[in-house]
């Protein structure tokens, strides 16, 4: 089936945001709230097994600070912490401290020039997505993406396929006419469960994860051009490390 749309994940895929973006912002939010929580690089790598920032904080508290969850306002505190984290994260983006991954801007430019439709499927908040696009691709970049599925528009986060089904419904395209670009095993599971062929470019935290089922696994997209992507989609092999 002809390739008609690229669907991008955001964190770890468009930009390597997790270690030096979200993790830093979470810690700033915790300090601001007077919490003793500190997520170092290895711990945050473990926490990434849980998708969604609010879900990640709840998971951490269950294991490391159960009294926090016993508070009657625990749910509200988590929402407040997440809002503060987003504020700190957006400040990092606006300051230009989180660049796009190599090759991403060129791939997006080539896709637009070829008339491919673009979409986003992510668990991060919508404002995180739009700020990253504007800060790194230009003030009009948000409009390049026909559908942006982000945050809590679906109840279940990746590896559940809900966000991909949500995006496909709005694109009005069959799954096989699309290509998902992801960085992690959770993202791959979500896309494949929705029936979408998937290219993996692992972020630093995802190195060594199981990517069985991916069309290809590329550690670096800097040398990846659109003709190669189209060819991989056409061949549609079950797994191909290039």
Image: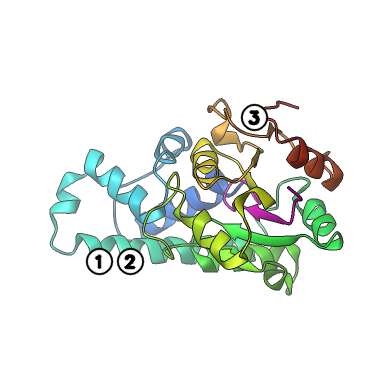
Q: CA distance from mark 2 to mark 1?
A: 6 Å
Which one is in front, 69 or 115? 115
Residue designated by label 1: 76
Taking the spot 50% from the left edge, 52% from the top edge, the residue there is: 22
Mark 1: secondary structure: helix
Q: CA distance from mark 2 to mark 3?
A: 43 Å
Image depth: mark 3 or mark 1 in front: 3
Residue designated by label 2: 80
Which one is in front, 207 or 63? 207
Q: CA distance from mark 3 to mark 1?
A: 44 Å
Mark 3: secondary structure: loop
Left/right placement of residue 63 relative to residue 94 reads: left
Q: Earlier in the sequence, mark 3 or mark 1?
A: 1
Position of residue 241 measured from the top left corner of the image (x, y, whole percent)? 71, 26
Indicate yes or no whether the magenta region holds residue 9: yes
Q: Is residue 91 visible?
A: no
Indicate yes or no whether the magenta region holds residue 77: no
Position of residue 147 measured from the top left corner of the image (x, y, whole percent)? 61, 67
User: Which of the labelled discs sits on residue 240, or is there none?
Assistant: none
Q: Is residue 43 visible?
A: yes
Image depth: mark 2 or mark 3 in front: 3
Which quadrant holds residue 195? top right
Around disc 3, counting alpha carbons within 10 Å, would you say few (fewer than 14), some (14 to 19), or many (20 or more)? few
User: Which of the labelled discs sits on residue 238, or is there none?
Assistant: 3
Q: Earlier in the sequence, mark 2 or mark 3?
A: 2
Taking the spot 23% from the left edge, 62% from the top edge, the residue there is: 75
Residues shaded magenta: 1-15
Tell me if label 2 and label 1 are in contact, CB under 8 Å: yes
């Amino acid at each position: 089936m002809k390739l008609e749309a690229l669907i991008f994940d955001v964190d770890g895929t468009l930009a390597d945001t997790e270690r030096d973006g979200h993790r830093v912002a979470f810690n700033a939010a915790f300090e601001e709230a007077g919490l003793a929580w500190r997520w170092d690089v290895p711990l945050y790598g473990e926490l990434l097994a849980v998708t969604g920032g609010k879900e990640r904080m709840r998971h951490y508290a269950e294991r490391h600070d159960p009294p926090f969850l016993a508070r009657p306002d625990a749910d509200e505190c988590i929402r407040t912490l997440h809002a503060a984290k987003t504020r700190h994260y957006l400040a990092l983006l606006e300051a230009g401290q989180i660049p796009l991954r190599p090759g991403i801007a060129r791939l997006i430019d080539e896709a637009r020039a070829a008339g491919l439709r673009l979409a986003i499927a992510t668990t991060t908040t919508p404002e995180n997505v739009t700020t990253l696009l504007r800060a790194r691709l230009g003030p009009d970049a948000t409009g390049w993406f026909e559908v942006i599925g982000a945050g809590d528009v679906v109840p279940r986060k990746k590896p559940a396929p809900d966000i991909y089904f949500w995006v496909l419904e709005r694109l009005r395209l069959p799954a096989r006419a699309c290509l998902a670009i992801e960085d992690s095993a959770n993202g791959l599971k979500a896309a494949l469960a929705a029936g979408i062929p998937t290219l993996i470019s692992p972020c630093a935290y995802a190195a060594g994860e199981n990517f069985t089922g991916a069309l290809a696994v590329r550690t670096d997209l800097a040398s990846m051009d659109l003709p190669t992507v189209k060819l991989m989609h056409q061949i549609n092999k079950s797994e191909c490390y290039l």
